[in-house]
Image (cartoon, grey):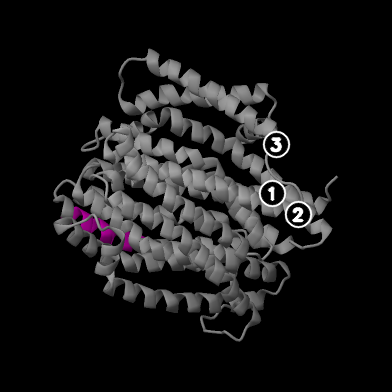
Amino acid sequence: MAPASTDKSRARSTRGAVFVATGILLSRLAGLVRLQVFAHYFGLRSDAADAFNAAFRIPNFLQNLFGEGALSASFIPVYASLVARGERKEADRVAGAVGALLALVVAVLVIVGILVTPVLIAAIAPGFSGDKRTLTVQLVRILFPGAGLLVLSAWCLGVLNSHHRFLLSYTAPVMWNAAMIGTLVAFGAGSSLPRLAMLLAWGSVAGSFVQFMVQVPAVLRLAPDMRFALDLASAHVRTVARNFIPVFISRGVVQVSAYIDALLASLLPTGAVTGIANAQLLYTLPVSLFGMSIAAAELPSMSGAAHEDAEGRERLRHRLDDGLRRIAFFVVPSAMAFLALGDVLVAALLQSGRFEHADAVYVWGILAGSSVGLLASTLGRLYSSTYYALRDTRTPLRFAVIRVTLTTVLGYLFAIPLPRLLGIDQSWGAAGLTSSAGIAGWVEMLLLRQTMNARIGKTGLPASYVAKLWTAAAAGAAGAWAVKLAIPVLPPALAAVLIIGPYGLLFFAVTFALRIPEASIAFNRFVRR
C-alpha cells in the first residue's frame, strides 16, 4: 500500500492536472472562437489568410524556443526543488535572476528579428511573392514584440506552476485571444483583408501584453523577495542555464521541423498554409488539454521528489504509468473523432462567411493526417517531463533530432512527390505533411519509452487496455456515422450536436462495459461536480 504522503502527493497532482486542464480548456475554447471569427472574415483560400498564418508562425519561433517548454524543463525543476525544501529566499533570487536574463536575451532577439525579417521570409516561405510576401513581412515585424511578451508570460507560468498555482497561468491566454477576437469583430466588416490582417497583428501584440500583466501581481505575491538582477554567480542559476541549453536546442530542432512544414506548405496551392493552421489548432486541443495538463501538473511534484535510488525510481514509474493511462483514455477517442468525424467538427466550428463546406472537408483531410500521431505526441510529453524531473534534458534532445529528421524526409515525400504519383490535387500534400509528422512522433515516443524503461523499470500502456479503448472509440464512431447518414441536412452546429453526442455516449458506455477504471473515475468526478 502506498504511504499516506504518496497518496496526498498524487491527489495534489490530480487536482493540479484538473486546474491545468481547466485553464487550457478555457484558453483553447477562446482560441477556437478566434479561429471561427478569423475563418468568417478571411475564409481559407485568400492571400491575406495565408500571409497572416505564415507571419504568425515566424515570431512564435521565438516564443516556442524560449517559452513554456524550455523554461518548464530547465527552470521549474530547480526552482520547485528550492520551494519544496523551504528555501524561499534563494528560490526568489533564482526566479529574479532567470527573469532578468530571459528579458535581456529576448529583447535582443526581438530587435534582430525585426531587422532581418525579409531574410526570414525568403528562407521560410519561398513560395510567397509580390503583395503576399510584402504583407507577410509587415505582419512579422508587428508580431515580434508580442512574441517577446509571451516568453515573459511563460516565465510567470514557471513561477506559478512551481507553487502549484496552475489555473491563472493557463487561463491567462484567454486575454490574448479575447484581444484578437475583439479586433476582428470591431474592424472585420469594414476593412479590406490586408488592412484587417495588419490590425489583427496589433491586436495580438496588445493581447500579449495583457496576458503577461495579469500574472505579474500573483508572481510578486508568491515571490516577495524577488529582485530582477543578473546573477550568474548563483550555482542554481548556472544549473538553470546549463539545463536550458540542450532543451533550447531540442525546442529549436522541433521548431525547425515546424518551419520545414511551413516552407513545404508555402509551395502548395493557396489555402494549404491556412488549412494546416486551422487543423493544428484543433489537433493541439487534446494534446494540450490531456497531455500537457498531466505533464505540467506532474513536473513540479516529480522534481521535488525524484531520486535515482530504488524508491525514487519506483515512485516515478507508478506516477508515469498512472499518467499514461489517464492520457490515453481521453486521447484515443479524440483521435478517432478527428479521423472519422473531422468534417462534422470542422464545419461546426468554422463553416461561416467566406469559409465553405469544401474548405471544411479539406481541413478534415489535414486533421485526419494529424490523428496518426496524436496518441504518441501526448504520451511523449509525459515521458519528456519524467526525464526533465530527473534533470536529464539531453536524452529527449537526441530523440527530437531523430524525429525531426524523419519528419523532414517523410514530409517532403508525402507532400510533393506522393500526390503527383497518386494523381490527386497537389493541395492534399498538406495532409501528407501532418501524417508524416505523426509517424515520426511514434518513433520518438517509442525511443523515449525504451530508454526510460531501461532506467526506472518497465513502463507503458498494456496492449489489452489500448485495444479496449480503440474498440470503444470504433463503436462510438460507428454509431455516430449511423446518425450522420440518417439525419437530413442541418446547420453544421446542430448536426454536430446530434452526431458527436452519441459518439461520446457510446464510447463511455462501452468503456464501462469493458470495466475500464478511468471511465468510472471520470463519471464519479463528473457526478460530484
Give whichever of discs 1 and 3 has the lower sequence position.
Answer: 1
Compared across the picture, whether 415 is left or right of 294 comes to left
Of marks 2 and 1, which one's residue comes earlier in the chain?
Answer: 1
Is residue 192 positioned above or below 515 on the image? below
Reading the image, the residue beneath label 1 is: 320
Residue 199 on the magenta span: yes
> Alpha-carbon neighbours of circle 2 within 10 Å: few (<14), some, or many (≥20)?
some
Q: Are marks 2 and 1 in contact (CB under 8 Å)?
A: yes
Q: Which residues are magenta?
A: 195-207
Is 169 above or below relative to 356? below
The front one of 421 and 261 is: 421
Residue 364 quadrant? top left
The answer for how far apart the CA atoms under marks 2 and 3 are is 17 Å
Q: Nearer the viewer, residue 394 or 317?
A: 394
- Disc 1 residue type (three-letter): Leu
Please name the residue that numbered disc 2 is placed on.
Answer: 456
Q: Residue furthest bottom?
A: 233
What is the distance, in whole Å, between disc 2 and disc 1 at their CAs? 10 Å
What type is the residue that disc 2 sits on? Ile
Check the image and name the residue furthest to the right. Answer: 1
Is 371 positioned to the left or the right of 13 in the image? left
Q: Residue at x 61, y 56 (%)?
A: 384
For the question of whether residue 16 can be seen, the reply is: no
Give the labeled residue for mark 3: 462
Q: What is the tally of numbered marks visible in this picture?
A: 3
Residue 386's x, y, as percent? 66, 56
How packed mark 1 is, by other alpha carbons closer than 10 Å (few <14, some 14-19, many 20 or more), is many
- Residue at x 70%, y 26% (from the top left corner): 515
Queried whether the magenta region covers residue 197, the answer comes back as: yes
Seen in the picture, residue 129 relative to 111 is either above or below; the reply is: above
- Name the amino acid type tagged 3: Pro
